[in-house]
Image (spheres, grey):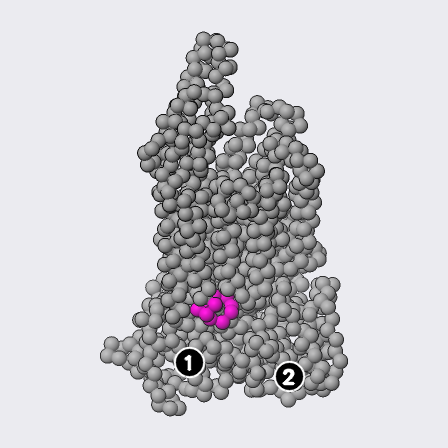
Amino acid sequence: MIKTIQKLGLILFLIGLSIFTATIFTGSFSLTQSELDSFISAKGFKSEIIQKELQNAVVSSENQNIFQFSSGVVNAVETSNANYENLIERYDAEKNWDKKGAQYQYIIFDKPHSLSYQLAKKAGKGFVPENRLLAWLLTFGLGILGALFYIIPDVILLGPPGIKNNGIFLNAATNRGWIGWFAFVFLVSFYILLYFYPDLIVNWVYLVDGISESISGNSASQWFLYGFLYCTVMTVMAVRMYIKYRHNKYQILRTTSVLFFQIVFAFLIPEILVRFDKPWYDFKNAFPLDYDFFFKWNLDELLANGTFGLFILVWGIILSIVIVPVMVYFFGKRWYCSWVCGCGGLAETLGDPYRQLSSKTLLSWRVERIVIHAVLIFVLVMTGFALYTFFYGADQVLGIKTQTIQDIYGFLIGAIFAGVIGTGFYPIFGNRVWCRFGCPLAAYLGFVQRFKSRFRITTNGGQCISCGNCSTYCEQGIDVRAYAQKGENIVRSSCVGCGICSAVCPRGVLKLENGPENGRINPTEILLGNDVDLMTFVNHKKQE
Amino acid sequence: MDHIVIIGNGISGVTLARHIRKNSDKEITIVSAESDYFFSRTALMYVYMGHMKFEHTQPYEPWFWKKNRINLKKGYVNDIDTDQKQLNFSSGESLSYDKLVLATGSKPNKFGWSGQDLIGVMGMYHKQDLENLESHAPDNKVCKRAVIVGGGLIGIELAEMLHSRNIPVTFLVRETSFWNGVLPTGESEMINRHILENHIDLRLNTNLKEIKSDENGHVKSIIIEETGEEIECNVVGLTAGVSPNIDFLKNSDIKTNRGILVNRFLETNTKDIFAIGDCAEQREAIGNRRPIEALWYTGRMMGETLAQTICGNRIEYKPGHWFNSAKFFDIEYQTYGWVFGEKGRPDYEKHFHWKHTDDTKCITIAYHKNSNLFLGINTFGIRMRHEIFDKWLTEERDMNYVLEYLADANFDPEFYALHEKEIIAQFNQENGTSIQSRKKRWKRIFTKA
């Protein structure tokens, strides 16, 4: 009976997911001449070519699907730009500087797929844009309902409260089996579409238009869709966390906290700010995770927003250089990484079923330290460039364009690393790929945690039996057992304090706590339980 | 240069090897017939349950051994030539040593039951037992029921393992209540209820008479001694304790009793041969400890100690205050100091027992009925700090002190409900005392005894 509900849930979820995926291929896209004209004039495009090309591409009575529509727009932009680039080259060869200079105003700097997205958002017809509520129910609605039907029966099926990791390594979803690989392909595709081909998923954006309008007053963008989906996925998977760890108050509170900060701070407040014509700002997102905080356009926008903008500017700086490190001193970086952060929030909810897949080898630790600190250096250098540009107005430093560096960071780190790899690779490399290998804020907090903090995971004397549950379930790939079996506290810069090592330990060996700094790091040779003189002898010898 | 040969790559042998390497440049060889690399035996259950893969049970990566110049030799030792100082392997090879350490662990007990060697009858100790179980009980279609014989720690773990794959389990326990040779009544009965809550068919006061075979030599059923009832099953787990794995020493002149007899320096009667871990038997028991202690941490401690002796700092094996831990399905158990069950309890030992209303947490504190001296504590569902109890035992604190500062000892994860106040209130009520609970203080926790 209960298993039937669970199976029904799975079927509903898969139907919802299939319809969601299938909506991409539905609908027809075209604009009227006047719609196109007003779009072009709003954009301020002066090129006649683009007008004509776009007209051919989007003003038509034929039923174009989004792929045809998209390639039409992309072609239009490319044709137009190619024309003027040729002219520029020609006038350059002719040394006709006036004419060469006059061509630049016709170049379209929008990314083709962004432009296509903006047009498509106005151009959609068909089932989804015309039945937004019904379409939402058939996609999000069925997905949420199905997932909950699948998850909630675990209250009974898992048996009495406790650690229930049964079958995790026997399951194709959680042991890199075919389901895991399928999830990997799906997630990676999702992020590639979201970041680089937003026009292709415009039907998904229609689904949440109504919700966006009721919060910010504007129709939805692909980023609103992402934010909404993020909150939805986290909420549903938080229900799973509440059931799985219902005996563990630390996990319950932590899950509630990340959920609260995601929904209120990362999603609702910024959207409401927009409603009141204020800059979109996530008050908990600290630099350097918030890598564009010191970009010129952001600083300009903040300074243009009077007292409120100034308040955000001051808050952002204080958050990063005072609040964040002071809190890490008292509580460890967990206060941010697994209680507040949005990336951490997704990792701890959607990613929880994959935590055992993170590599624990010494090699992966070496790679981790090189890569994460390289990203930190990258973001700091880039910020140096950005601030120089902001204060001195020079758009390049030492012959390198600030914009170029910012673009490279945004593409490589912001999109590919944090999104495509960071989340897309959950089912393969575990749920903290970004936090472990990439996040510059995590690297910064890690220094504080390692060298000046009260946080540690205390090892309980001689109780460890080296079983390895702690290491296996460490999402950050820390070999927790290596410390526990030596009777040594775990003080590691990468620890995000999720508390799962302590939860899965069958012998009550590990406890996350904030205590005196003195004695926090306690390398030992002989564990408690053995003869006291021997312990003193050997441990003392080591300190000499 | 001395060649140290260690037979057995369990926790005792490996700890010894690591500590010899820390302290010397001696040549070290570890011999094992069971597995290529050291793994945590206690974690085998989690491999079957799908919590981990076998690789996860290995605390050191394969490169560790070469880097630390510890030779690993896979082979089964047939006999030891103590005159020539040489091991003879079943493969016909031989290996000579300067010092030999026997760390061969245990093997499951079999008490001569009829049918105990049938296909599908197994212990749960070796890596091979795990492989055996995986082939005979992969799911509840192949294995329609399993019977477990023997109500100790391995028995309940095996029950949990099979239960994780939805295989129905009948659990035969000789005693009147689960593990009540060790646990006081209140605790033992709470675990009985927890076993039943996990849908295990628990049969107390029940002995095995015989195991019956089908025509292919597979297990078909078992017969219960008391009632003659026949229970059909495909797997029988024999978990009635373990004994030292020393059969290969039969023809040697190394002196054995149940285990290999050693003195406090872990030396056998033969020069340059030592024994540590489960297979070693103290000539005289140390304190309340048994002469043979098949425990993870005693194996480790013997390894730590013997490494000193072998590296020239001859030192006695002196285990500190007794402690242990286990997990019964979802209920964790820890013990510090001595708390006796009904069996063998000294008459001066008085118990205070508190149980939470949810029936998954309880504690029993043992103290001297005249002097009030704290003797030991058992906790179920509540974690305690080893350091604190070790210190209190050394400082010989009394019952009032322990209760007053109980909050210092709590080791549960943050935000867990604390029960010190209820515990103390009950003690006060039962004994007419007025002990007050003190708040946790870091300063006290970090003060050494």
Magenta stretch encompasses residue A163: yes
Q: Residue furthest bottom?
A: B227
Name the residue carrying label 2.
B351
Total marks placed: 2
Q: Is residue B421 left or right of residue B120?
A: right
Dividing the picture into quadrants, the one containing residue B137 is bottom left
Residue B54 drawn at (x, y percent): 42, 61
Secondary element under disc 1, as helix, strand or loop, is strand
- Residue behind mark 1: B201
How busy is the neighbourhood of tag 1: few (under 14 within 10 Å), some, or many (20 plus)?
A: some
Q: Which residues are magenta?
A: A155-164
The residue under the point 67% across, 38% down is: A309
Percent of width and height locating residue A351: 48, 53
- B154 versus B180 height, above or below: above
Residue A495: image location, x then y, percent: 58, 52
* SS class, disc 2: strand
Q: Which mark is residue B27?
A: none
A78, A355: nearer the viewer: A78
* Residue appearing at x 59%, y 66% in the figure: A462
Label 1, label 2: how many angstroms apart (C-alpha)?
31 Å
Please say whether residue A113 is visible from this viewpoint. no
Q: Is residue A345 left or right of residue B426?
A: left
Amino acid type for the residue under numbered disc 2: His
Q: Would you place residue B87 above or below residue B231 in this image? A: above
